[in-house]
Amino acid sequence: DDPLATCNDGSPGLFYWAPAAKPARRWMVLLGGGAWCWDALSCMLRLPEMLSSAAYSEEMHVDPAGILADASFHRVWAPQCSSDAWMADVGANESSAGVNWRGARIMRSILRHLTTARGLSDGDTLVFGGISAGGRGAMVHLDRLKDDGLVPRGVKLLGYLDSPYYIEMPPFEGNVDIWHRVVTQTQQTAASMHNEVILRGNGACKLAEAWQCAFGEFRLPLLQTPFLLVASQYDAYGLVLAEGAWTDSTHCFPDPQCSYYAYAFRFANVTRQGILNLSRTAKSSVGVFSGTCYNHAQSLFPAYTEETIGGT
């Protein structure tokens, strides 16, 4: 209903809706991932479906082993077509990069629709979260949903944050450009998107620099709303971004491999320690699912039900 809730190319934002199989008062809203862009060039290099809703069909396939297959919830899946990790609300004529970044506005429009048209009301339970970039966006907005009037105050609100946990690491072997540095990307997006008000959430985040409010390592300990964090200690996206190389069952790191593995071990140790500290210092009730598989953002796929840690 909001004409400004648009993708990068100006096409309308979108979401998919699936009602629960039986009458229910449980809702799930998940924001999609797909990284972000920080200037005209990085946006131009993204895939069409990351910039526009025109590429999406009327229906979507849901993996029967993924989280969206849980028909005990009313479910919303919102693909990201705004390239801002859901953190911006600035038009192309307003941003210093000349890019239309409206993810925050799309998210708000979706939640208002659920209340006005779908029946989300006091007494219901809402799991609000996201996958990868969507998890980072949900992290930024979670504590403000009720105060901003997007969710009725009587709703029980819980966060589900899959792979939002950016960490600050030294560069890997000279990979100091923005394409390999999540800190630099986060700093640049904050500058380009002019989104300090959104990142700080009207006082919800009082860190020294606004970009830190978009960075998992720094923002998650501040959350007041109970949430579940899903974060692999060997986060594949974080490692691929930093190292510029990846590995799986058929591909190995480039030779010499030792430096790649040594960096991955350090990365895992920093992640593990941060998560342990989070459980001790967080301002809200925190659940953590953190394994040592080399993966990222698995909630939509069979790993959601197949991966276990200590029997859980």
Image (cartoon, rainbow, N blue to C red):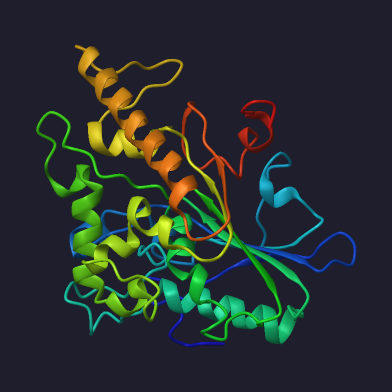
Picture quadrant of residue 37 = bottom left
* Nearest the eye: 39 or 89: 89
Q: Residue at x 64, y 38 (%)?
A: 304
| 272 relative position to 78: left or right | left
Quadrant location of the N terminus in the rendered image = bottom right
Q: Quadrant of residue 236?
A: top left
Q: Is residue 134 above or below residue 260?
A: below
Q: Is residue 303 visible?
A: yes
Which residue is drawn at the image coordinates 32% and 35% (left, top)? 270
Q: Is residue 70 above or below residue 125?
A: above
Looking at the picture, how far across and down is residue 27, in whole percent? 72, 65
* Residue 6 in sight in this render: no
Is 67 on the left or on the right of 107, as rendered? right
Residue 310: % across, % down: 64, 25
Viewer-closest of 279 and 131 = 279
Determine whether, in the image, residue 178 is placed left or right of residue 72.
Answer: left
Location of residue 41 in the rendering, given as x and y in whole percent from the top left corner: 19, 59
Q: Relative to the observer, which residue lies in front, 293 or 309?
A: 309
Taking the spot 49% from the left edge, 63% from the top edge, the residue there is: 138
Which quadrant of the rendered structure holds the C terminus? top right
